[in-house]
Image (cartoon, rainbow, N blue to C red):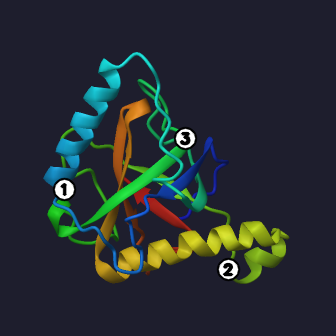
């Protein structure tokens, strides 16, 4: 999977909770615990009749605006506009030995792509990116580099759309590896 060349389908804000640290890749959580928490949170959201919005004080940091493509899941609902990162786990803990080729490793998982506008080399000049787009791309690039360096995946949870997933950075042998990632 390389940097997507097709047009994006949806736009999302990748946000993080107050207690999430990208530099320390913490909290580090067991993926089974993450999945149990996801199932419980989604069940609780389904049991209530009101739709809750994540508390803005709990999720104050917008890391980047990212895009999904036609391979993103859309049934029963597409991913939500806000994707809150709640923790990290090792690639090995979700049965991924390398980020060079990611296949779904658990039942019910699918693979899709996340990306931002490329801000490397000639692309920055060719696309005539605005400063905010360059900053956005660099923020996502830092996340990808940290995930790759620490052999980790970031876990996001969206109870309103009944979705949860792992963000896995592309292997650094891929072109534009800092501007695109896998989503499981």
21 with respect to 140 (left or right): left
Mark 3 and mark 1: Cα distance apart in space: 27 Å
The residue identified by callout 2 is: 120
Contact, CB < 8 Å: mark 3 with mark 1? Answer: no
Which residue lies most toward the front here? 57
Residue found 76% across the figure and 81% down from its top: 122
Q: Secondary structure at mark 3?
A: loop
Q: Nearer the viewer, mark 3 or mark 1?
A: 1
Decide: few, some or many residues near mark 2? Use Cα within 10 Å; few <14, some 14-19, many ≥20. some
Q: x, y percentage for residue 14? A: 52, 55
86 with respect to 97 (left or right): right
The residue identified by callout 1 is: 31
Residue found 49% across the figure and 54% down from its top: 59
Of labels 3 and 1, earlier in sequence is 1
Residue found 74% across the figure and 66% down from its top: 133
The residue identified by callout 3 is: 70
When the figure is inspected, residue 147 is found, relative to residue 117, above or below; the finding is below
Mark 1 and mark 2: Cα distance apart in space: 33 Å
Q: x, y percentage for residue 109? A: 27, 43
Contact, CB < 8 Å: mark 2 with mark 3? Answer: no
Q: Quadrant of residue 25?
A: bottom left
Decide: few, some or many residues near mark 3? Use Cα within 10 Å; few <14, some 14-19, many ≥20. few
Nearest the camera: 176 or 42?
Answer: 42
Q: Quadrant of residue 107?
A: top left
Decide: few, some or many residues near mark 1? Use Cα within 10 Å; few <14, some 14-19, many ≥20. some
Mark 2 and mark 3: Cα distance apart in space: 24 Å
Q: x, y percentage for residue 31? A: 19, 56
- Residue 175 appears in the figure: no
């Amino acid at each position: 999977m390389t940097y997507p060349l097709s047009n994006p389908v949806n736009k999302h804000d990748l946000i993080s909770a107050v207690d999430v640290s990208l530099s320390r890749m913490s909290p580090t959580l067991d993926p089974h615990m993450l999945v149990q928490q996801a199932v419980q949170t989604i069940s609780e959201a389904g049991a209530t009749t009101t739709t809750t919005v994540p508390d803005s004080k709990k999720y104050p940091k917008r890391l980047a605006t990212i895009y999904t493509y036609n391979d993103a899941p859309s049934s029963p609902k597409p991913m939500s506009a806000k994707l809150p990162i709640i923790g990290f786990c090792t690639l090995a803990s979700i049965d991924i030995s390398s980020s060079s080729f990611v296949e779904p490793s658990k039942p019910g998982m699918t693979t899709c792509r996340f990306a931002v506008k490329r801000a490397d080399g000639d692309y920055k000049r060719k696309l005539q990116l605005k400063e905010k787009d360059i900053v956005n791309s660099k923020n996502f690039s830092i996340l990808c580099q940290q995930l790759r360096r620490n052999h980790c995946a970031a876990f996001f949870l969206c109870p309103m759309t009944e979705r949860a997933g792992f963000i896995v950075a592309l292997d650094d042998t891929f072109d534009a590896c800092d501007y695109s990632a896998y989503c499981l």
